[in-house]
Image: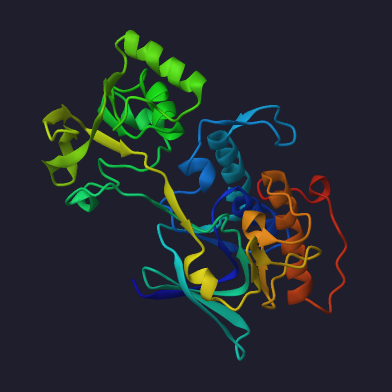
């Protein structure tokens, strides 16, 4: 891929804070492009705990992380954001002549932007892949590292590998959706919340989940990216073939600021240092919001990230239009496209 396009604001990170920044920017008339290393939006909410309830989102006594992302996506869509997913930002520079930042992705896509907002959470995410031969040819076809739509696994034979919260939670959820669910773990003890483990064990007793312990993944069998079997082995090397249409390996995610660490930011051990009044970094025109931003008394809460998103885009408007006097308008007065 070799293509360049221009946007008003490039947002690095499509988690909840990045998505809300799209809405806030749209209300001020800016177009946004979101870039994320994961293949789908949502950041940690989608990748780590989509079915976990969150209790501190204003107006929602309880909302799952997955539902929150769906609501934020709906809120952002009237402003037609451009999504660049499954790609990380590798290079970044500012052109004094055009007054534009140019970001290049791992796939060679170039994005020119008037301002940059880093909403990268703990950094770029990537799955901890199991060391299986040719696993890449099955990825996003029959091997998935996250679940966006559980119903897509209806009537399929699903093998889940792992012993933490993600593995146990998804086993419980898919037990009533999939044709079969088998959980493979190299230990007989699981590391998930005890309530979730208890629920899984009840489903095992009811015949809705099968446990394969202590076993670990050995190899994959299939053609053209579609699995037919997952081969597992015990500690003595004895192998068992499990019929499988889908493999969900949940071995956690790698988190790293990656190339962002090479950018000329002021970076502390807690993240990218920003001015808490504007969220601007030490690089003029580049801002950081959410968990990646660092300032005194910082609270790493989603609701604080929402506030930081609003502060950043208002600061961007002032920066891009320094000679214009703006009058603050509430959304109830201004409305949104299509309302």
Residue 180 in view here: no
State whether residue 96 is above or below residue 192. Answer: below
State whether residue 195 is above or below residue 238. Answer: above
Q: Give me the residue at 56% from left, 41% from top.
A: 69
Q: Nearer the viewer, residue 129 or 33?
A: 129
- Residue 93 horizontal/vertical position (percent): 54, 81
Q: Residue furthest top?
A: 206
Q: Give me the residue at 79% from left, 51% from top.
A: 334
- Residue 98 horizontal/vertical position (percent): 60, 87
Q: Nearer the viewer, residue 335 or 95?
A: 95
Q: Indicate the quadrant where residue 163 lies.
A: top left
Q: Residue furthest bottom?
A: 97
Q: Indicate the quadrant where residue 201 lies.
A: top left
Q: Give me the residue at 34% from left, 32% from top.
A: 152
Q: Give me the residue at 58% from left, 74% from top.
A: 113
- Residue 228 horizontal/vertical position (percent): 14, 34
Q: Using residue 91 as the reference point, say whether residue 274 is left or right of it.
A: right
Residue 200 in view here: yes
- Residue 136 horizontal/vertical position (percent): 23, 52
Q: Using residue 280 as the reference point, say whether residue 13 is left or right of it.
A: left
Position of the C terminus by quadrant? top right
* Number of numbered discs visible in the structure rendering: 0
Position of the N terminus by quadrant? bottom left
State whether residue 94 is above or below residue 183. Answer: below
Q: Indicate the quadrant where residue 2 lies.
A: bottom left
The image's colour scheme reads rainbow
């Amino acid at each position: 891929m070799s293509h360049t396009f221009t946007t008003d604001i490039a947002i690095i990170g499509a988690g909840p804070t990045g998505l809300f920044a799209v809405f806030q920017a749209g209300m001020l008339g800016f177009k946004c492009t979101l870039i994320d290393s994961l293949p789908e939006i949502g950041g940690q909410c989608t990748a780590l705990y989509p079915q976990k309830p969150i209790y501190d989102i204003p107006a929602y006594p309880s909302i799952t992380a997955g539902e929150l992302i769906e609501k934020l996506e709906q809120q952002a869509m009237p402003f037609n954001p451009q999504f660049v997913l499954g790609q990380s930002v590798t290079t970044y520079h500012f052109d004094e002549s055009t007054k534009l930042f140019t970001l290049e992705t791992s796939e060679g896509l170039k994005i020119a932007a008037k301002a940059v907002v880093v909403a990268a959470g703990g950094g770029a995410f990537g799955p901890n892949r199991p060391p299986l031969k040719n696993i890449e040819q099955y990825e996003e076809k029959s091997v998935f590292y996250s679940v966006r739509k559980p119903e897509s696994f209806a009537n399929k034979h699903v093998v889940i590998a792992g012993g933490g919260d993600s593995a146990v939670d998804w086993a419980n959820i898919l037990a009533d959706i999939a044709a079969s669910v088998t959980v493979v773990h190299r230990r007989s003890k699981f590391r998930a919340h005890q309530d979730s483990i208890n629920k899984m064990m009840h489903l095992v007793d009811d015949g809705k989940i099968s446990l394969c312990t202590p076993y670990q993944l050995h190899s994959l069998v299939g053609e053209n990216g579609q699995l037919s079997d997952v081969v597992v082995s015990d500690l003595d090397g004895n192998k068992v073939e499990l019929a499988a249409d889908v493999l969900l390996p949940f071995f956690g995610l790698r988190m790293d600021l990656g190339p962002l660490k090479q950018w000329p930011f002021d970076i502390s051990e807690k993240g990218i240092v920003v001015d808490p009044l504007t969220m601007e970094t030490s690089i003029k025109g580049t801002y950081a919001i959410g968990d990646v931003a660092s300032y005194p008394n910082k609270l790493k809460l989603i609701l604080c990230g929402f506030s930081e998103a609003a502060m950043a885009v208002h600061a961007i408007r002032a920066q891009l239009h320094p000679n214009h006097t703006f009058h603050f308008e509430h959304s109830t007065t201004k409305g949104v496209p299509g309302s």
